[in-house]
Image: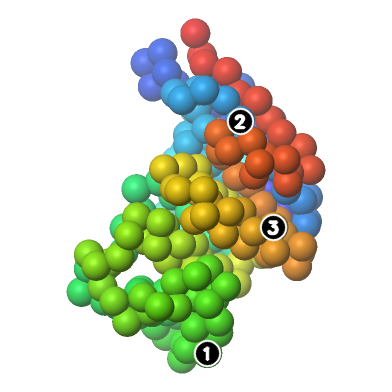
Amino acid sequence: MIEARNISRDFGGNGLGSTDISLDKGGFIGISGASGCGKSTLLNILTGMLRPDSGTVLIDGEDINKLSSAKRTALRAGKIGYIMQGSVLLGELTVLENIILPARIAGKTPDNAKAEKLCEKLGIDNVMNSYPSDISGGEYRRTMLARILFADTPILVADEPTSNLDEESAAIVRNMIKEVHDKGVSIIAATHDSELLSLADSVIQLHPLH
């Protein structure tokens, strides 16, 4: 589903060294490595958010770096759910409204029952009608995950999805990622979480450029 060869990106001595990665349908790849070794850079390149200095990225056989920005965005929206570090919810919308927002943007009628079921599984059904400013950090992160999962993309890319969470929240996120993987979703997760890495079919260890 994703095939990357010899991709690299140098930010003046920091970034990503030449890397190959191949994600098969239904696969789960873990990305490990110390902070600053290029994990987020790798994910941003694989999802078309960032162009590499070298190498190619194919998604379902299509070279994403030969696409226009609009086409890359459309491809990402249809095929990849990306849980980014620093992603934010809209403060004027409730938790439930934030989760169904991508469907509204796409001009679709949101399935509220599906969104509510996701909230129950992620343990945030008690804050569905609350605003982001009124929920905990763990609830916030789980809402971000619910919004991504609601889109039902065949690929899930996650950047440190359990970082800075208490163990209860981290366990809920791990269990949900395992559940969607068991249902056939292909996953790439960059993480320091050894328990999450243990769920992966394979783990790629990144190293600093210098």
In percent of the image, x 66 and y 52: which residue is there?
187
Q: How is the image coloured?
A: rainbow
In the rendered image, which quarter is residue 140 located in?
A: bottom left
From the viewer's side, name the closer residue of 76 and 127: 127
- Image coords of residue 91 (percent x, y): 22, 68
Find numbered disc 1 in the image and state the secondary structure of the residue it sits on. helix
Question: Which residue position holds label 2?
Answer: 32
- Image coords of residue 206 (percent x, y): 60, 24
Quick check: 62 left or right of 183? left
Quick check: 15 left or right of 183? left
Amino acid type for the residue under numbered disc 2: Ser
Task: Mark yes or no: residue 129 visible.
Answer: yes
Find numbered disc 3 in the image and state the secondary structure of the residue it sits on. helix
- Dot 3, crowdedness within 10 Å: few (<14), some or many (≥20)? some
Find numbered disc 2 in the image and state the secondary structure of the residue it sits on. strand
In percent of the image, x 22 and y 64: which residue is there?
133
Amino acid type for the residue under numbered disc 1: Ala
- Image coords of residue 97 (percent x, y): 35, 80
Q: CB under 8 Å between callouts 3 and 2?
A: no
Q: Which mark is residue 206?
A: none
Question: Which residue position holds label 3?
Answer: 178
- Image coords of residue 41 (percent x, y): 47, 34
Q: Which mark is residue 113?
A: 1
Q: CA distance from mark 3 to mark 1?
A: 22 Å
Q: CA distance from mark 3 to mark 2?
A: 18 Å
First along the sequence among labels 2 and 1: 2
Nearer the viewer's eye, disc 3 or disc 2? 3
Quick check: 63 left or right of 147? right
